[in-house]
Image (spheres, rainbow, N blue to C red):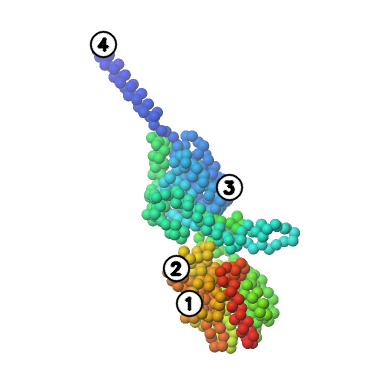
């Protein structure tokens, strides 16, 4: 009996020791919380940025939180707010492991993900769209009541130097990706700078994402990195959300961006092209017609003004050649009887056969026809879009062996400031290019013609075709006794863009051509 009792006590003692050992073992294991933070929608307001930063701060200061999973379903937002969240998460990641799930992480949404140590995505997640969009600085219209001490005190930036600001912002974005991804990144800067959207599976191959996985897998990875043996998952801000309006891809427009952040403003955001083109283009009042030698046609829905062409019109005035803007075709027709030059700039309504014949008659008897087109929405507008963009200008230009291409030209290696400001260095030996070694065109269309006279480099792409080539941007043709000049850009004719490269020398030569026709009697 005594022996049996001894064995019982011994067994109890062994069990107790085992229990103590197990208790000690688990006590030595790391136990804690894995916090989940969800970032959703565009980050366009300070309320949204402050809300998400407060969640990050809470995770950072809570000693029980040992790791964080940030779930990003965002197309980015205002640059300052995106940078705040990126830097906050980066700081947190220095203290506790941060793992990201890129549900949809475009532009600034991906910028935020780049702060994480490890990134998951779903197979069809949208990832990437690396880049910057902006609303450009306004022109200063000075006041005699509100005075400023410097030319950029109100605007903040030079319109030309703002291109460099965009490049600096892009560099910051790319540097954040390179720092966060390190040797895992297999996409080059050139590839990322294109702003392409990748599916999750493509993003893994490029090293933008580490693996395809779920939120549960992200939690497991975060717990593993924190060395947690036992953990509980908590959702920070569950059931709450930022105060104010919620912005998704379906309700963000160019006018909304301008109302939230007046120009100039920078965004790390993916905004669909249709949303950026949802506002109305500028409507400039035309000067009263005065019988000038240069006739500017406004009768076909042209969204141009004296400001659009001010450098050319100023040079013409120096040569005693005046210009008049006419808003009805009957006025244009009458004015052509004594005119030397007809300017047709970005019409949004097609020309009739009778109107084309009248213009051809004007050119053949010695007139100058200046055909200008610009693929920018400010000139095309909703009416131009409804009329297939280039169809209105080509309804007239085609009669003279010229057509303007759909889409715009861009280069990823030879540009001024940003990719769609193309450089032109290849010219015919025409007098029109005397003293011109380089032009810069701003969002320009290609000009198709056997009379082509100026070309971009063969590293240039046409956006509609996505094909590299040596595209023409200016055509020069003799028709009867007259001349036709076609240019695939309008922006270059206004300040300050006319001052870039040799743009002004070209404008001056063009003014000489028109003035010569005026002296001959038009």
Mark yes or no: residue 340 visible. Answer: no
Q: Residue furthest front?
A: 435
Q: CA distance from mark 4 to mark 3?
A: 77 Å
Pick whichever of labels 1 and 2 is earlier in the sequence.
Answer: 1
As displayed, is residue 33 above or below residue 110? Answer: above
- Residue at mark 2 to residue at mark 3: CA–CA distance: 44 Å
- The N terminus - image quarter: top left
Q: Are marks 4 and 3 in contact (CB under 8 Å)?
A: no
Residue 503 image position (x, y, % from top left): 57, 71
Q: Give whichever of 197, 415 is nearer the camera.
A: 415
Outermost residue, top side: 2
Q: Which residue is mark 4?
A: 2
The mark tally for this picture is 4
State which mark lies toward you, 2 or 4: 2
The residue closer to the viewer here, 12 or 221, is 221
Other-residue count near label 3 (Cα within 10 Å), few / some / many at <14 / 14–19 / ≥20: some
Label 2 element class: loop
Question: Which is more N-terminal, label 3 or label 2?
Answer: 3
Task: For marks 3 and 1, give the CA distance.
Answer: 50 Å
Position of residue 423 measured from the top left corner of the image (x, y, whole percent)? 51, 69
Which sits earlier in the primary sequence, circle 2 or circle 4? 4
Residue annotated with mark 3: 47
What residue sits 46% from the left and 51% below the top? 177
Q: Secondary structure at mark 1?
A: strand
> Does 12 appear above or below 257?
above
Which residue carries the number 1 mark?
A: 448
| Residue in the picture at 47% in, 41% down | 94
Which residue, given by chain and number where applicable, does mark 2 sit on?
Answer: 459
């Amino acid at each position: 009996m005594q022996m049996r009792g001894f064995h019982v006590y011994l067994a109890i003692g062994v069990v107790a020791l085992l229990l103590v050992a197990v208790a000690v073992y688990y006590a030595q294991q790391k136990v804690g919380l894995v916090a989940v933070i969800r970032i959703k929608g565009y980050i366009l307001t300070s309320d949204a940025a402050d809300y998400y930063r407060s969640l990050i701060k809470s995770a950072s200061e809570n000693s029980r939180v040992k790791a964080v999973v940030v779930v990003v379903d965002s197309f980015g937002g205002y640059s300052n707010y995106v940078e705040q969240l990126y830097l906050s998460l980066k700081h947190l990641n220095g203290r506790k492991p941060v793992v990201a799930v890129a549900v949809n992480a475009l532009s600034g949404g991906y910028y935020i993900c780049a702060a994480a140590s490890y990134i998951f995505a779903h197979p069809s997640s949208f990832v990437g769209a690396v880049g910057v969009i902006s609303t450009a600085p306004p022109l200063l219209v000075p006041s005699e009541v509100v005075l400023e001490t410097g030319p950029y005190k109100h605007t903040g930036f030079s319109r030309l130097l703002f291109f460099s600001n965009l490049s600096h912002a892009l560099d910051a974005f790319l540097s954040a990706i390179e720092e966060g991804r390190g040797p895992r990144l297999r996409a080059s800067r050139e590839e990322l700078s294109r702003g392409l959207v990748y599916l999750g599976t493509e993003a893994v191959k490029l090293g933008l994402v580490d693996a395809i996985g779920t939120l549960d897998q992200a939690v497991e990875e975060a717990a593993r990195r924190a060395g947690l043996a036992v953990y509980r998952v908590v959702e920070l801000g569950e059931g709450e959300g930022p105060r104010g309006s919620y912005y998704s891809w379906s309700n963000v427009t160019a006018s909304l961006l301008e109302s939230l952040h007046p120009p100039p403003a920078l965004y790390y955001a993916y905004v669909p092209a249709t949303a950026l083109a949802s506002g109305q283009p500028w409507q400039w009042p035309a000067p009263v017609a005065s019988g000038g030698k240069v006739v500017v046609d406004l009768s076909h829905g042209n969204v141009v003004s004296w400001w659009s062409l001010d450098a050319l019109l100023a040079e013409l005035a120096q040569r005693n050649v005046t210009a008049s803007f006419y808003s009805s075709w009957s006025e244009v027709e009458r004015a052509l009887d004594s005119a030397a030059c007809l300017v047709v700039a970005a019409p949004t309504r097609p020309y009739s056969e009778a109107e084309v014949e009248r213009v051809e008659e004007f050119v053949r008897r010695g007139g100058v026809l200046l055909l200008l087109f610009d693929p920018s929405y400010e000139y095309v507008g909703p009416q131009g879009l409804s009329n297939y963009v280039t169809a209105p200008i080509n309804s007239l230009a085609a009669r003279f062996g010229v057509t303007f291409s759909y889409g715009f030209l861009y280069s990823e290696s030879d540009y001024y400031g940003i990719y769609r400001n193309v450089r032109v260095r290849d010219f015919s030996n025409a007098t029109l290019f005397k003293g011109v070694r380089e032009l810069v065109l701003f969002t320009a269309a290609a000009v198709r013609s056997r009379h082509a006279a100026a070309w971009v480099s063969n590293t240039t792409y046409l956006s509609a075709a996505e094909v590299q080539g040596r595209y023409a941007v200016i055509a020069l043709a003799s028709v009867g006794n007259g001349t036709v000049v076609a240019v695939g850009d309008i922006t270059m004719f206004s300040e300050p863009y006319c001052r870039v490269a040799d743009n002004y020398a070209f404008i001056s030569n063009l003014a000489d051509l028109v003035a010569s026709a005026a002296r001959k009697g038009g």
